[in-house]
Image (tube, coloured by chain):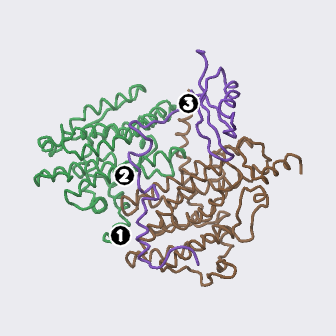
Chain colours: A green, B brown, C purple
Amino acid sequence: MEFGRGLDENLRAVLREFVLTLADDELVLGHRDSEWCAFAPLIEEDVAFASIAQDEIAHAALLYGLLEGLGGGGPDAIVFGRPPEAMRNAVLLERPNGDWAYSVMRHFVYDIADDLRTGLLLRSGETLFRSVADRMRREERYHLDHGRTWLRALALGGPEAVQRLQHALDRIAADAFDLFRPLAWEGALVRAGILPEAPSRLWERFIVRVRAELSPYGMAFTPGVQAPRGRTGEHLRDLADLLQTMGEVWRSDPKAVW
Amino acid sequence: MDADLKAFEARIARGELIEADDEMPDAYRRQCLRLVVIHANSELMGALPEREWIPRAPGLQRKLAILSKVQDEIGHAQMIYRVAEDLAAPFGTTREDMLDDLLSGNAKFHNVFSYPAPTWADVGIIAWLVDGAALETQGALLRTSYAPYARILRRICAEEAVHLKHGEDIVLTLAGGTPAQRAMLQDALARWWRPLLHFFGPPGESGNKDAFRWRIRTASNEELRQGFLRKYVPKIQRLGLTIPDPELRFHRESGLWLYGDPDWDEFWRVVNGGGLRTAERLNLRRLSRDEQVWVVAAMGRESAA
Amino acid sequence: MADLDVYEVFGQERPGAEFRHAGSLRAADAEFARVLAQELFCRRSEYVALWVVPRSCILEAPRAGGALGPAEPRSYRLGSGYRGTVDKWKLFGGEQGGVR
């Protein structure tokens, strides 16, 4: 079954753009998560977080795989061959890891966003979207569980933990709108029956969900709309550095088999 | 020899296995603990050279595979430290004490994890040959008399066997790749060959006799090294790579591989903390521990509440 | 009967083997559970050792929607994910393996 079959050229381009937002988010976050490998706060946690990183990178691979039918080469060419301005991930996910509070809370907040977004895909008119979303969600449930456990531990973990937690949440809130900023091409996907509604409409539900998770601990989440614009390719220097590192070997000979 | 020790040695001689809660002489406990802690430290430190390549792996599948491999090594450290914690409990020693010991440079770990891994080919050589060497020693330890260690080693060996395939696949891909890829592979092999011979320890240095009498260890350094050479030298030669030892040859009469003196002074320098990357990697671990102190403290508070 | 607790029993079939779940029992306290477990599970010498654990101490780690682990096995974590090495060796001629 070919992804996006029967769609006109414009719609295929829009579809490609949309898949890139999903896949780039997962890739960049998975890469950041993997940077913790061997240095998480506890050996047991290290193993768990490395699995979460693999889940995200594997989801990215799955999503890039969808694009093969839309042109643009295989997953590796898409991942390693693009300049930063062609990346469609939210800036939130490219920020360096910071402390453990920032890393686990960024992941948790993103997981909530991802849960809403994959929920949207479950209602997609594209069969392949539905099956990919189903596979992703089976693993994302564990991510939510993991994030919630850390939220509890940090929120009840004494003054320093609480202060770091709130600081992390404030930084995350400042970037969060980028995840759901309305984009010019959303309407086309809804009109074509590929999406039941525009992803940007999830924004309010997202805030409600995040606040519901935080409310038992009296923690605040006050996002602004002055967030960065990663979805349209405006990225930080941090992403350029990340891509530089990520492609170091592959780009030494892109034609070689590695 | 007191009566308890005699009875214990009779158990060992009958081929019995020792469980964590069994009576055991302190000397046996200490011998086991020494071996197990070196193994745990090595798994933990062994993650560091390879982890440098997780962000750089050329390809998403390679990235997933190297990440999962390093994850497994950390997982091995977790299982082995758990065995060590139970062994050490009567001495009042905790995992934190063991890690402090490691980070202060007072504890040993395998020589190979003190060397740099400057290219992607190192990732292949480490996973294929260093893990191959490790599998040789760990396979022999499956027959150890300390049952909790033997049990986790079964899982560890199964996972190491997958790492080996992952390494073999990288090595084969580079060996069959461009001239530059082959040159990178040859260079990595040349750098790793001597540390690989060192890995098993000096010949004739059978360690503590008790470790063999009590079946904590079951194979000598040289037996393990010969097992490694028997398996891997022919494969390396088949790939057309050059092993940097002009004296290396198979001696038909004895069935042994003869090799040139690999400079055991370097081995001793490295295992005593003088390896090229020892200080840097220990420092990295220390920094990470210090940065996580607040997290560990927070976790304790929640369960105490 | 109401205040009897459930204990889960894990047995080791031979020295050095893993402990496997053998069954469960109800008992008034941990001492009873230990004593009763022996006769319930070892009367034909099935096990060389038993662990008796209050069920309330057992935490389950469920992943909703089925098995633990990823949604489908990750090939790079399995030996079978590297079957391609067989073909790659063919590039290098000869038989792989030990010295003859």
Residue at point 29%, 32% (across, down):
A207
On the image, numbered disc 2 is attached to which residue?
Answer: A57
Residues flagged by tags 1 and 2 on a common chain: yes
Q: Quadrant of residue A71?
A: bottom left
Q: Which mark is residue A257?
A: 1
Label 1 neighbourhood size at 10 Å, few (<14), some (14-19), many (20+)? Answer: some
Same chain letter for marks 3 and 2: no
Q: Amino acid at mark 2?
A: Ile
Q: Chain of mark 3?
A: B
Is residue B177 rendered to the left or right of residue C48?
left
Query: Which element is circle 1 on?
Result: loop
Provide residue C22's location: percent of width, then percent of height.
60, 35
Please report the residue visible at 38 percent of the width from the left and 45 percent of the height from the top: C71
Q: How many marks?
A: 3
Residue position marked by numbered label 3 in the rendering: B303
Above or below, C47 relative to B58: above
Q: Could you say which is closer to the camera, residue B24 or residue B44?
A: B24
Within 10 Å of disc 3 (Cα), the crowding (few <14, some 14-19, many 20+) is few
Q: Is residue A128 visible?
A: yes
**Which is nearer the eye, B261 or A208?**
B261
The residues bearing labels 3 and 2 have C-alpha atoms spaced at a distance of: 33 Å
Q: Nearer the viewer, residue A230 or B264?
A: B264
